Amino acid sequence: MKRSEAIGLLGTAAGAGLMGGRASAADAVRFATIPIDGGAQAWYAQSLGYFAAAGITPTIDSISNGSAITAGVVGGAIDVGYSALLTLAVAHEKGVPISVIAPAGSYLSKAPISTLMVPADSPARTAKDLNGKIVAVNGIKNITQLATMAWSDQNGGNAKSLNFVEMGFPEMPAALAAHRVDAAFVSEPIVSSALRSGVARNIGTPYDAIAPEFTISVWFVAGSWSKANPALVRRLSAVFRQTSAWANGHDAESAQILSGITKLPLAVVGGMTRSRFDETITARHLQPIIDIGARYGLLAKSFPAADLIDPNAVQ
């Protein structure tokens, strides 16, 4: 579907007040997301009036635990959730009925939002130098660990020798400075803050080992909810597409909204490498995550990314 057609869905839906072919009031939709740059589209859409234009009344909850969001969507307490794609791939393999309706944060090698950092005074310069060392990631057996393993193996290191520990992104610079860890997979805005303070430096960009461009996180619904609300899913997907296009071209304006959501100072948000968003959901940009999960044993085997995409999503 062309962008003009997708955005046209918003006006048509709002003007007619339709869902599933019957007149109705604005549809109430419960969203849950993590308060980070890559998961901010729902707040942008709310602030810009895109949901209202589409006949949708949103309730947006901030939840820091992606697993809790997934459980809420599957259990019916949440209608639309934000999640790392790898988490949903694991759930899909286990037979959990979930359906991806839109992309969220994406990775571009030309503008990395996450890097592997070492203490500023570390002698490590290459992947091989980290063999046998302690590496902090924000989740054991999640995408940050898998990406670091792939980067190590692709750049002369030995991923099997790495000792991973779990730690929140905000705690990583202090752990590096105190040499409690030898390296850490750090995400924005912590990367920019650590560089400015001089406590750490970049040694690599592990996401490059997955692909130059891919979708990291997505918006999803339960399969049963999608089947019950196909027209609403289509409108939601179109809103996310419109919001992504806006966010990709309005860093200054979105920084104002993001600062209010995350409580980060505007100067910090404005100085970090910002997330970019795919404007349509494509199997090509989902597949690298599924493949890396299978390569490093988090998934039993790879499967077609198209299996995760909702048939009503704007593509």
Image: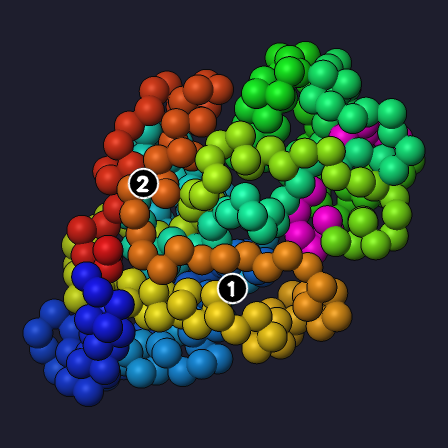
Badge 1, how many Cα within 10 Å: few under 14, some, many 20+?
A: many
Name the residue carrying label 2: 284
Q: Residue 190 in the image: x percent, y percent?
A: 73, 51
- Kind of residue at badge 1: Ala
Q: In which quarter of the image is residue 6?
A: bottom left
Note whether 223 is above or below 276 in the view shown: above
Residue 54 seen by the camera? yes
Q: Residue 93 in the image: x percent, y percent?
A: 32, 29
Badge 2, how many Cα within 10 Å: few under 14, some, many 20+?
A: few
- Kind of residue at badge 2: Arg
Instruction: Tell me the tag on residue 69.
Output: none
Image point (33%, 24%), residue name: 302
State the extent of the magenta-drawn residues as a range.
Answer: 179-191
Left or right of residue 65: residue 269: right
Note whether 4 is above or below 96 in the view shown: below
Left or right of residue 114: residue 190: right
Image point (87%, 38%), residue name: 120
Q: Residue 189 in the image: x percent, y percent?
A: 69, 55
Rounded to the nearest angstrom, the CA distance separating label 2 from label 1 is 23 Å
Observer-nearest of 120 and 308: 120
Image point (29%, 63%), residue name: 237
